[in-house]
Amino acid sequence: IGGSAGFAGAPALTALAALRSGAGLVSARIPDVASAAIAALAPEAMAHPAPARAGCLDLAGLTGWKTDLAPFDAVVAGPGLVTGEGPSAIIEHLLAHPPARLLLDADALTIIARRQPPRRLASTGACILTPHPGEAARLLGTTVQAVQADRPAAVRRLADATDAVVVLKGCGTLVCAPGGRPALNLGGNPGMASGGSGDVLAGIIGAIWGQGLDALDAARLGVYWHATAGDLAAWHMGER
């Protein structure tokens, strides 16, 4: 669930990554302005464009398509969604009526950061959050410098506060479950610090999670696959 005028490629990259990571069928609920990007980048995905007068999705655009997301093995929401009134209503709806597996990324994280202080996100189902340091700082009500000064403490605090598995992206990505010990990924390279890389990671983790692993294992394996793919690309073509 995502996309908007100017950010049409984000959900397309997420859908493509999910397909390449083993998802047998991927549906994309997107605004009509994002349908061309899905068709070009991920033609195997089932695109469901919604009329978007403001250039982005709104709650009617979601519920008019599906009132119940339970049939889906996993739901990824946020890539390219933007943070206006319509997208905010979608994220609040997803938190109030959570699917069994809900991954929140990108603009969805900015939306939930407005719920200060951070609190448990959903009463049922499971949730994965995939913030970069800036998004983690907003979620915790602190600064990027504070997050980066003690990344293990930040990811633990966020996982405990939200009762979600948290992937704190960056050099040495950390994955932590509530009450758990962070796992550190040592793969990856600076060439991966480019627009769209996080959208791809969200699709990888969502696809793995939907195939039956628990949230923590899906997040850890997804981070590993993503970093390893980046390292293989750097080895063959260079970081640039």
Image (cartoon, helix red, strand yellow):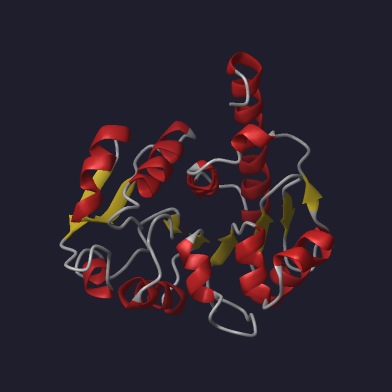
In the rendering, at what x and y percent does residue 14 appear? 43, 44
In the displayed image of the protein, which residue is found farthest to the top? 236
- Quadrant of image for the C terminus: top right
- Comparing 208 with 183, the one in front is 183
Horizontal side, residue 96 vs residue 152: left or right: left
Asked whether, in this view, residue 70 is left or right of residue 62, the answer is right
Using the rendered image of the protein, determine whether residue 43 is visible from the camera's viewpoint: no
- Location of residue 180 by image quarter: bottom right
Of 41 and 97, the residue lying toward us: 41
Query: As drawn, is 239 to the left or to the right of 174?
Result: left
Of 12 and 212, nearer the camera is 12
Residue 98 higher or lower than 171, as above or below: below
Q: Which quadrant of the rendered structure holds the N terminus? A: bottom left
Residue 199 image point, x, y percent: 48, 47
Q: Is residue 108 above or below residue 11?
A: below
Q: Position of residue 144 (x, y in %)?
A: 71, 65
| Residue 60, above or below 3 | below
Q: At x 51% / y 49%, what residue is drawn?
A: 202
Residue at figure coordinates x 22%, y 73% from the top left: 60
Residue 3 falls in image quadrant: bottom left
**Count of number-bearing discs:** 0
Estimate the x, y position of residue 17 in percent, counting from the top left: 45, 37
Could one spot residue 78 in this view of the protein?
yes
